[in-house]
Amino acid sequence: MTSTDLLSVATQFGAPVYVYDAEKITAQYNRLSQAFRQVPSVRLNYAVKALNNISILRLMNHLGSGLDTVSIQEVQLGIQAGFDPKNIIFTPNGVSLEELEQAAALGVQINIDNLSLLEQFGSKHPQIPVCVRINPHVLAGGNANISVGHIDSKFGISIHQIPHILRIVELTGMHINGIHMHTGSDILDIDVFLYASEILFNTAKNFKQLDFVDFGSGFKVPYKAGDIETNVEELGQKLSARFNEFCREYGRPLTLAFEPGKFLVSQAGKFLAKVNVVKQTTSTVFASVDSGFNHLIRPMLYGAKHHITNISNPQGRERYYSVVGYICETDTFASNTQIAEITEGDILCFDNAGAYCFTMASNYNSRLRPAEVLWYEGQAHLIRAHETFEDLVRNQVDLKDSFFHAEATA
Ligand SMILES: *Cc1c(COP(=O)(O)O)cnc(C)c1O
């Protein structure tokens, strides 16, 4: 997708709009598959929460991907997008027994991450195979906001509680067919990841009926110049060799599973917004776009840096800008960042807008959520229309004026 392609999308569909490049998603999928080609059976389960548009899910299905889901609604989306429930894993946190049962009834693989539900589910449905999510207590990456493997994390069953898991399995007669971990969002250090994998292998040895070992995700992609990205080729080589060796120790071939979200879709996405106002203050130049954290919240929520370019003036002289939104609250996308000279009406392009961008959008300030477009084989295809005012009020119940008692007169 060139800047000209992107500008044409903004013109055709109107900004703000999300655009996803199918070719980039495909390339990332193939790159990850290739990295693990030495393992006879590999399953990549795309994490739906990163980007949940049905047409994106169909593309994933087409590529041969499975799905990783965290809510019954994501399971339903996957099924609607044509996935065989067998290729969907349900990895929720803190859900009810009923929700697990609903997912199991649809035929998807259940992954349980606490002892209470493991015991309840196992007692009621010992015949349904279950995967267990363990917490290896390894801190992957340095950011406490996005590391979920450490000691105080709410995710997974502690490895120190393996004896308790085994007791539940023995008492209920349930069948554990998978072992899972998802340590955090960034694999920066492959040795740390391999160390966590050893803990997973050690845990796996306790279960005799496994079909798969699931290593979750955490593949880091670059957001800004100088960012380290996970070396998936090196990881693939080292982990594949170790995994094959483990299967020999275990006595049976197993499937190696991953649940990449960000890795598959982050870089494929661009967010296009129009500059409404350029405002010079005593200390900075603000460029205000027709968007805010109602459309893209990651900069404000995580301090994420999304590289911004002015696709209306790509050759323009660079100047420093603070890019802000139109929300009545601080909604700074970037401070003092160099962008080619901006004129009101220009279209700014935000990179890495594929993962956790549209899916985190809201209607705050009663604003409408943007359209989504899939760029496929050189052409733009609308995959979600811009919301309308009707969407905003659809589920609201208007009690009407006559409902309220007349105001007491003084
Ligand atoms: C969010 C999530 C993922 C995907 O993480 P990325 O960093 O986007 O790759 C995978 N597995 C589970 C269980 C998750 O909750």
Image: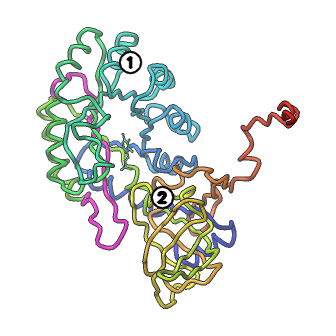
Q: Amino acid at mark 1?
A: Ile
Q: Nearer the viewer, residue 46 or 371?
A: 371
State yes or no: residue 220 in magenta.
yes
Other-residue count near label 1 (Cα within 10 Å), few / some / many at <14 / 14–19 / ≥20: some
| Left or right for 122, reference 78 | left
State yes or no: residue 29 in magenta.
no
Residue 67 coordinates in the image, percent (x, y): 44, 41
Q: Nearer the viewer, residue 230 or 213?
A: 230
**Range of the magenta residues?**
204-232
Residue 187 coordinates in the image, percent (x, y): 25, 53
| Left or right for 327, reference 401 | left
Q: Which mark is residue 354?
A: 2
Toward the front, the furthest residue is: 410
| Left or right for 395, reference 316 | right
Q: What separation in Å lies between label 2 and label 1 (alpha carbons)?
A: 35 Å
Query: What residue lies at 48% left-to-right and 32% top-to-bottom?
Result: 85
Other-residue count near label 2 (Cα within 10 Å), few / some / many at <14 / 14–19 / ≥20: many
Q: Quadrant of the C terminus?
A: top right
Where does label 1 land, which residue? 128
Residue 363 coordinates in the image, percent (x, y): 63, 50
Label 2 or label 1, whichever comes before in sequence order: 1
Q: Look at the image and tell me whether residue 41 can be seen.
A: no
